[in-house]
Image (cartoon, helix red, strand yellow):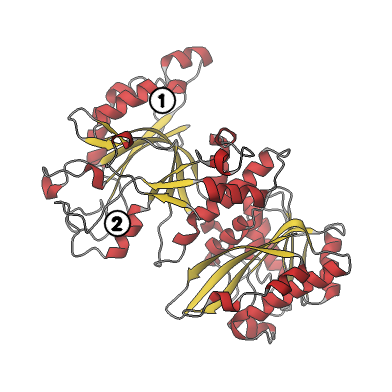
Amino acid sequence: RFIIECRSTSSEADNIHHRDGHPHPMKISNYLIYWRGEHKEEYSQSFRHLEFLSALSATIADHYPNLTIDAPSILQQLMDGATFANAFSFDPFKKHKAKLPASVPLHQVDMYNETLQYVSFGNIAKKSHGVLDEALISQDLVAKASARCSLIHSSYLVVAEGMEYADLVDQALRSKAFDDMSESETVAHQNSKTWRIRRHEYSFVNDENNPRFGKGTTRSVKKEKSALQQLEPLLISFKGKVDLKNPECNIYLLEGICDNCVTDSGPKGITELLKILARKISSGAKVSVMAPKTRICITNTPLEPIAAFILCNLASIRENDKVLDPFAGSASVLLAASMISNSVRTVGIEIASDKFLSREKVRQDFSTRGLSQPLGLLIGNSMDSKIREEARKLIGGSEFDAIVCDPPYGIREAMSGSDSGYGGSAALFDLIDAIGRDRHLGTPLLKRGGKLVSFFPCLRGDNIEDLLPSNERLKRAGLLFEFKREQKLNSALSRWVLSFKSS
């Protein structure tokens, strides 16, 4: 559904020229996202855009409470109108002298090409028929949405782009993107921001011809020093002090191969790297603080932090939302929800007794991270209407804004004593049926417009369409199917994220 663009040199309208007459791509967006890498191929890449846009939809809904559409509807407009475009690109099959070393696998090329992406909202107004507008999506909202995303490393405001450092200086000075750090602004405010600049060069991890600068780093101090000397006309206009540890303004020089920019001269056939000058506006979510090895409550199969964040963000969790996990386990989902917004009110239901899972240790996992405690961690089967009624009482007898879960299967399923059958599909179906029964009795578990987001495991090669809950089942529960995304776990097993909206 997303529009994915790779920039082309075929149209002069898409290019400007630097001093030597070589074309380079025009800056196509104010925002740039640096995605987290994947430790396992195809594990999270397909969720990147969806997690960010879901987080952004919740952020927009919180910021503009008088909008005539809710967060799920905002998400739909963003999915239809947002555009992502690769900042760097390398085509291994294109005839040029920048050949792909034999040591680099092809899948790494795709990862490289999508490491840094521009995101543009220019089509939003047209796709939403004027309900949303690009002007509504401010830098602050992009930063807030980025900060809650597990798959974002950093997000940036693009200042300049070019093939030569002199081009970057000219564009930056003309754009006045650093006016808040210049002498005129210093005089007006009697203070100027501290700053730091870093240069990062992106290449292939296993490229023997262009090795990385030490283990796991993209930074060369020698190249950075040379770049800073060429950026001096811009840097001398900054009146604030340099702060290498905690600057108010983080400036980045991001450089990488771009097919549009490869020429025949220079070592290895690559003369210059595309250069992007940008101001960092946000870091992504610090998922490592809830990694299994940091937890007080230790279980055999905890939901990994990235998966928990993905579920919560795809549920478009907002401030003060009431969130239920009916298969809570050690409460990874509720932890992620509270890290996204500590104002959320969470309730967990887990069938395992304290003999197998200590609720006190779960609560310690919240308190040691400075997070609000769950309103309740109930012991029981979420298919039991009495347990669901108890969960509702904890939030004042109202409905939940979101139900977010990873139903039990495999080891977890055996420990709970469940007989839900293949792949945990019956656990989700049972939950949907329970939602339907509560709705029929006039005690709805999920509010109108609320979301049910769940993992759904299946064997690789199975047709997911044949395994999904039927339209009749969803209709009885008052649920509308929204979307699905696959996460490949291994050669035999996948799990899908399924999203439903209460009507």
| In this rendering, position of residue 151 left or right of residue 225 | right
| Residue 230 percent across, percent down from the top left | 24, 28
Q: How busy is the neighbourhood of tag 2: few (under 14 within 10 Å), some, or many (20 plus)?
A: few
Identity of the residue drawn at 11% across and 43% down: 266
Q: Label 2 to label 1, Cα distance in Å?
A: 31 Å
| Residue 269 percent across, percent down from the top left | 13, 48
Q: Toward the viewer: 5 or 111? A: 5
Q: Amino acid at mark 1?
A: Lys
The answer to the question of whether label 2 and label 1 lie on touching residues, with beta carbons closer than 8 A, is: no
Identity of the residue drawn at 44% across and 35% down: 30
Identity of the residue drawn at 62% across and 37% down: 130
Q: How busy is the neighbourhood of tag 1: few (under 14 within 10 Å), some, or many (20 plus)?
A: few
Say whether residue 381 is visible.
Answer: yes
Residue linked to disc 2: 215
Q: Secondary structure at mark 1?
A: loop
Identity of the residue drawn at 87% across and 59% down: 397
- Which of disc 1 and disc 2 is earlier in sequence? 2
| In this rendering, position of residue 2 left or right of residue 24 | right
Residue linked to disc 1: 241
Q: Amino acid at mark 2?
A: Lys
Give above or below for 142 relative to 339: above
| In this rendering, position of residue 92 left or right of residue 343 | left
Say whether residue 368 is visible.
Answer: no
Q: Secondary structure at mark 2?
A: loop
Give above or below for 153 relative to 26: below
| In this rendering, position of residue 77 left or right of residue 383 | left
| Residue 223 percent across, percent down from the top left | 23, 40
